[in-house]
Amino acid sequence: MQQEINPWSSDQSLDIERLFGDFGIEPISTVTDLLPSIPYFIRRGVVIGHRDYQRIAEAIRFHRPFHILTGFMPSGHPHLGHLMVMKEVVWHVQQGGSGYITIADREAHAVREISWKKCDEFGKEYLQCLYALGFHGRTYFQSRNDPLKNLAFEASTKVNFSEMQAIYGFSPETDIAHAWSVITQVADILYPQVDGIPAPTIVPVGIDQDPHIRLTRGVAHKLRMFTVEDRESHISVRSKEAPPEALEEVHRAFPGSRKFEGHVDVPGGVCADVADMVREIERRHGGFGFFTPSSTYHRFIPGLQGGKMSSSIPESTIGFFEPPETVKKKVMAAFTGGRSTLAEQKELGGEPGKCSLFALNLFHMVEDDAELGEIRSRCLSGEMSCGQCKKETLARVTEYLAEFREKMDEVEHMVEV
Ligand code: TRP
């Protein structure tokens, strides 16, 4: 049975590994060898799955252009649960990607009924966090981006109601704004290729967003005029909805090619080069020439109370402007992998794999692998008590937040609303 994924559900207890098989998501380990350096979020098993990431890894390796885009719904203050995807974006920008951030205010307004004023306030905070982490690139609010809306309209010509129903379980009672917010996200994901040049685009997301990724990949394909396929003996360029003049131009671009009804066969050549040329011709004839977007999937950081991390459960997470007293309270009360008595813990050791604070250290608070390994082995051996670990973790969190706030203040002027 296929596991359903609903992007608006509050239940994030999805078994990611199982979803790989069901939905065609690949383990990230299949492509990491291509990367010149492996970032800590892959090394530590936080980012674990992908679709078509080899394109991005190659672009990084061979210094070819690529885009990196993700989005945030401004339905509350940013908190620890958003930090990972922000760092993924910043890392890809540092690797040469052109960065894009969308603030999904249309989605927040349509799906979560957040006022426009609140959308602005929260959205600004997300952008401030990103700049504080070192983001460079373009940012926009969905509601104020006209080319995005035009692209969404174009995308909507390729999606019908039964698809919306099949993917998201939409019913006749679903309001149209909800469908609009979906198609706007499709447009978000394709937007860098319209605003900039067509290029591979990586979209780092949590697994809950995969339905949008699948839908967008389908739309990107449907909006192409041509498909290019390596058939071993030749390269086949098929017209889908290309005007006859465009197919003729493809034929003329490749000496020795043969033109048939609806397709051109190119003898020999490198498929990627043929694809690039065809993309250019498509663009000259008013097409988009999209690359099908790629995605990565990360695990969700567990909540400090032991369940999921969400702004709707205050004790599960820490906001970036929380006062030291509540930060302290939350860390000291966090769910750990400790045993029921100190004596038992000394004998059996703790269980870092079950501990929300170990996860917090692994995700964000300890950059050095050796130091993290040390924490793990002190826990496993029973040498370090949970009380001690909480104190040490609190010190790290406090320092992190203080520095982060300072940086956020410094970059405030960069945020445009
Ligand atoms: N739907 C996303 C969320 O709920 C936000 C979002 C909007 C997004 N557009 C996007 C995410 C494009 C990734 C790519 O958080």
Image (cartoon, rainbow, N blue to C red):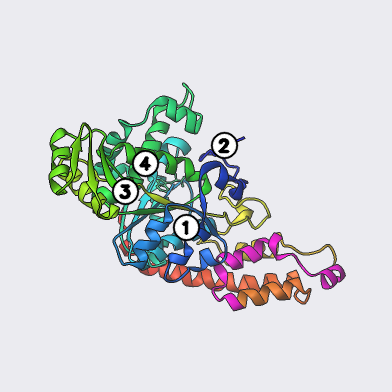
Left or right, 14 with reference to 28: right
Left or right, 298 with reference to 394: left
Question: In which quadrant is the N terminus drawn?
Answer: top right
Residue that badge 3 annotates: 291
Q: Amino acid at mark 4?
A: Val
Depth check, mark 1 against mark 3: the one in front is 3
Q: Earlier in the sequence, mark 1 or mark 4?
A: 1
Residue 277's label in the rendered image is none
The kind of secondary structure element at disc 2 is loop
What residue is drawn where x is 46% and y is 21%? 172
Q: Amino acid at mark 2?
A: Glu
Disc 3, ligand 1: is the CB inside 8 Å? no
Which residues are the magenta region? 343-370
Residue that badge 4 annotates: 186
**Image location of residue 357, percent across then percent down:** 65, 64
The kind of secondary structure element at disc 3 is loop
Q: Earlier in the sequence, mark 1 or mark 2?
A: 2
Left or right, 187 with reference to 334: left
* Mark 4 neighbour class, 10 Å CA radius: few under 14, some 14 to 19, many 20 or more: many
The kind of secondary structure element at disc 1 is helix
Residue that badge 2 annotates: 4
Q: Is residue 217 above or below residue 92?
A: above
Q: Residue furthest right?
A: 343
Q: Are marks 2 and 4 in contact (CB under 8 Å)?
A: no
